[in-house]
Amino acid sequence: MAVSDDAVADMAERLSQQASSDPRPFLFHLSGRCGAALLEPLREQGAVTAAVHPVMTFTGDPESEVRRMARIPFGVTGSSAEAIVRAMAVVQLLGGRAFVIAEEKRSLYHAALSHAANHLVTLMAGAARTLEAADVGDPAAVLGPLVRAAMENSLASGFAALSGPLLRGDRGTIGDHLDAFDRYCPDVLPDYRAMALATLRDMERHGMGQADAMPDLRRMLEDG
């Protein structure tokens, strides 16, 4: 059932009212947010039900997206142990790697994926607009190597991969950033402040950064 999240329950209800030649069909949807509970009307009719979510972004380019499907993870939630086994078999046939998500953690799981993939697009768009304002002709070419390296380091090392002026406690650099955003790209400034404050919070959690600079940095970022 490859439909939007909000359409899953309605489709399950309609399908449950149709006769099936298979007394125990295996039916699953591809939604990330929803678990197997939305397919309860089908389970009550004897179906084995599950949620089988490919952890991948889809933007409407079938050729590239089919290539990306190889060996990707799938978040699986089943209405029973049998459902999980059958869902994992489907994932294996597709060449993917399955992992189990509890029904009650499904929204949290999907929120994490959306936070990473969707908000990254917004972050890159803001950075590209800022480079354009700095008269950089091809922002993507400039950002690409840096962002890919930061992404690889982050996936390999977690928050320990952090670098940059916040980590060094460079008050002057952060002040210059804020002034430049305010002058040339004021629409990006709130995003920069929010991300920098989130970075400070995680630095404190991990015991990183220059302790004497933290209060000043926080004050600079919170002002305005």
Image (cartoon, grey):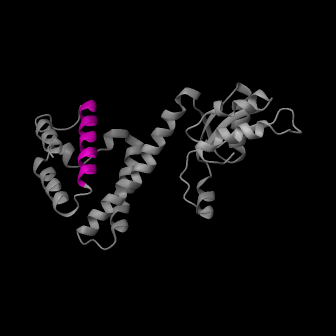
Look at the magenta stretch and give its main secondary structure: helix
Q: Which residue is drawn at 65% across and 33% down?
A: 38
Residue 60 placement, left or right of 14? left
| Depicted 68 relative to depicted 107: above or below | below
Instruction: Work out which quarter of the rendered image holds the N terminus and state it.
Output: top right
- Image-based side of 82 in relation to 161, left or right: right
Residue appearing at x 24%, y 72% in the figure: 135
**Can residue 114 be seen?**
yes
Decide whether residue 195 is among the magenta residues: yes
Q: Where is residue 73 in the image (x, y as percent from the top left)?
A: 58, 43
Can you say whether 207 is above or below 167 in the image?
A: above
Q: Is residue 98 left or right of residue 202?
A: right
Given residues 12 and 98, the one toward you in this image is 12
Residue 77 in which image quadrant: top right
Q: Which of 183 and 155 is in front in this view?
A: 183
Depth check: give the residue in front, 140 or 15: 15
The residue at 26%/57% (across/down) is 187
Q: Give the range drawn in magenta.
A: 189-206
Q: In this view, does 49 lie above or below 134?
A: above
Residue 203 falls in which quadrant of the image?
top left
Residue at horizontal 13%, vertical 40%? 219
Asked if residue 119 is among those painted magenta in the image, a careful observer would answer no
- Residue 112: percent from left, percent from top: 45, 39
Q: Where is residue 65 in the image (x, y as percent from the top left)?
A: 59, 58
Residue 195's spot in the image, x, y percent? 28, 45
Number of marks in the rendered image: 0
Query: Do we see residue 89 in this rendering?
Result: no
